[in-house]
Amino acid sequence: MLKTCGKRFLLSIVGATFTCLVVLFVAQLQQRNQVEAVPNGREVGMRSLQSLESHDTQEPQRSQSDPQQQDSNPEQGKGFSAYFTKLTRSRREAEKTESNPEVATEKPPMEDITPNDIFIAVKTTKKFHQSRLELLLDTWISRNVQQTYIFTDGEDEELKKRIGSHAINTNCSAAHSRQALSCKMAVEYDKYIESGKKWFCHVDDDNYVNMRTLVKLLSNYPHTQDIYIGKPSLDRPIEATERLGDNLMRPVNFWFATGGAGFCISHGLALKMSPWASGGHFMNTAEKIRLPDDCTIGYIIESVLGVKLIRSNQFHSHLENLQQVPKSELHKQVTLSYGMFENKRNAINMKGAFPVEEDPSRFKSVHCLLYPDTPWCPSYVV
C-alpha cells in the first residue's frame, strides 16, 4: 500500500512540474511577440529622441558604407522631422501664451455688468472746480454723467447746471487734512449705499477714468462677494496704532489702495463695512488710527474684516512715473493721472491730438484716442 501511495505522489509532482513549464513557455512567447511589436513606434517617445541625438553622428558613416541604408534614410528623416517640427511649434505656442498676459488670463466674464451698475465718486474741493473739474467734465465724465457723483465742499451753481443733483456739497472742510478727507469719504459711502449699485469706485479730481476697461475689469468679479481692488502707493503694509480706549493701544499693519489712483469695492463688501463706515462711524474709525480716508478704508477691509486687497496695475496715480505707460497700452488702463513726480511734470508721454502746452495733463489727447468721435477732437484722430 505504501508503494502505491508513493507512486501516486511521484506522478503528481511530475504532472505539476510539466504544467508549470508549459505555462512559462506560453508566457515567454507572448512577451517576445510584444517586444517585437515595439519598434513600430520609433517615431514617438524617448526612442525618437535617442534617434535624433545620434542622427548627426551616424549620417556620415551611412553615406559612405551603406548605400542601401542611405536610400531608406529620407523616409525616416521625414518622420523625425515632422515629429519634432510639431513638437517645436507646440512649445513656441505655449511660450507665446505665457508671455502674453491677455491670452493667458482671458476668461469669460463672471458677471454681465454695465456702466449703470457702477457708482463713481469723484472727490474734489471748490478751488479746483475750474482748474481740474472742468477738464474731467469735458472728457470722461461727459460720457458717464449718470454714473458719476462729484463730492465737493462748496456750492457751485455752474456745476449744478452741468450735472444736476450729482454735484454733492458735503459741507466738509476745504482743508486737505485727514479729518476733512475722511468727512468727504463718509458722505461718499453713505450716498453709495443709498444708490444700491453693484460697485463703489472712488477717484480723485486728477484722474481720468476709462469706463470701458473698468466695466471689463469688474465683470471678472461677483459683486456679492468681498472684493477690494486697486493699487497700493507703498511697497509694504502701512503701520499704524489702533486706539482701543482707556489709554489702550495696539499696533496694526495692513495694505490699502491709494485714493490717488482710485479703487473699487463690491456691494457685498460695502455692506459688511457698515458698522465702521455708515453714518458718523467712518469719522470715528479714522480717528482710531489717525490716518486719512483711503488708509481708513484699507484698515476696515483688511485689518477689521480680514479681506485682502486685490492689486491691479491698471490704476495709476501721480505718485508714480506716468511716462512709463506706453501709448499702445492706454486703452487697457482703468485710471490715469497727472501732476508732479520727483519735481518734474508727470503725465502720459504721447503725441496726441493736442500739443503739451494746450493739453498738459494729456487727458484731452487720451480722450480723443479712446473716443475719436468726440465733437471737439480733430477729425484726423483715429
Image: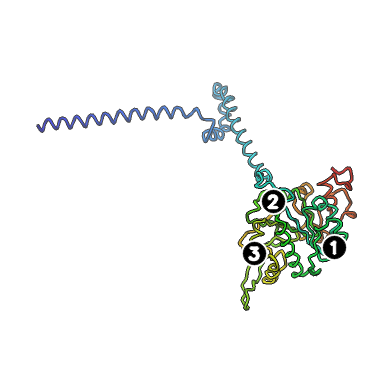
Q: Earlier in the sequence, mark 3 or mark 1?
A: 1
The residue that mark 2 highlights is: 218
In the picture, the quarter occupied by the N terminus is: top left
Determine the residue positioned at 19% across, 29% down: 11
Residue 225 x %, y %: 63, 54
The residue tagged with tag 2: helix, strand or loop? helix
Determine which residue is flagged by label 3.
Answer: 254
Name the residue type under label 1: Phe
Extreme residue in the bottom direction: 247
Q: Quadrant of the C terminus?
A: top right
Q: Is residue 342 visible?
A: no
Name the kind of residue labelled 2 in the image. Answer: Leu
Q: CA distance from mark 1 to mark 2?
A: 29 Å
Asked if the residues shown at circle 3 and circle 2 are in contact, with their CB atoms under 8 angstroms apart, the answer is no
334 left or right, relative to 43: right
Q: Which residue is mark 1?
A: 128
